[in-house]
Amino acid sequence: MRDQFLDSQVATNLIALGDPVLYEVHEMSRPEVAGELVQGISIVHPGRVGAEYFMTKGHFHTVLATGELYMCIQGQGMMVMETPDGDWAVEALRPGRVLYVPPGWAHRSVNTGASLDLVTVFAYPGNAGHDYGTIDRQGFRKIVVDRGGAPEVVDNPRWSAPKPGG
Ligand SMILES: [Fe+2]
């Protein structure tokens, strides 16, 4: 995760000081076939790396044409999303909110709360798979930072635009 954060020096220092757990994902494994639904719970702990909130790495689905459903049950946060063409969207997560991530959209949860875990329940098709490599290479176009105690969505200066054809 270190290289996903804007301030990689602060991230390096945090790792040296004990390498805190940023998030946990617990899921019911199901056969990796269409028709199945994998369900689970995602917990993003509160905290920041510099101005940037703790977040998940985020991913595209290997089978791009698969969506995902999230429901927030605790905490405050944002879902940062983007398409392979570089379109982006950021949606608020708060208890009771159901968020549909359409097929083709990469997704990452960000905990913007001061002290509570951000907890979401999710479900996605069994054949979806996870592509973390694309995000490793290009990052997300938008990041969420603390500005004077409130979250703000800003351009990621380290984002590299997707290359045509992959
Ligand atoms: Fe997903």
Image (cartoon, rainbow, N blue to C red):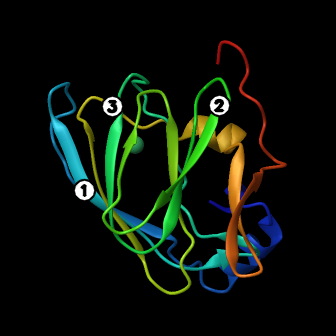
Q: Which type of secondary structure does the marked residue at label 3 adopt?
A: loop
Q: Quadrant of the C terminus?
A: top right
Instruction: Examine the rendering and report whether any part of residue 50 can be seen.
Output: yes
Front-lying residue, 29 or 84: 84
Residue 6 point in image, percent of width and height: 78, 60
Mark 2 vs mark 3: which is more N-terminal? 2
Quarter of the image holding residue 100? top left
What residue appears at the point 78 percent right and 65 percent down from the top-left corner? Answer: 8
Q: Quadrant of the N terminus?
A: bottom right
Tell whether 66 sits left or right of 12: left
Q: Which type of secondary structure does the marked residue at label 2 adopt?
A: loop
Mark 1 vs mark 3: which is more N-terminal? 1
Tell whether 105 sits left or right of 150: left
Q: Which residue is mark 1?
A: 40
* Discs 2/3, front: 2
Q: Looking at mark 3, is its residue's CB closer than 8 Å to ligand 1?
A: yes
Q: Looking at mark 1, is its residue's CB closer than 8 Å to ligand 1?
A: no
Q: Does residue 24 lie above or below 136 as drawn? A: below
What residue appears at the point 72 percent right and 56 percent down from the top-left corner? Answer: 3
Marks 2,3: beta carbons within 8 A: no
CA distance separating discs 2 and 3: 21 Å
Residue 26 point in image, percent of width and height: 28, 61
Instruction: Examine the rendering and report whether any part of residue 26 can be seen.
Output: no
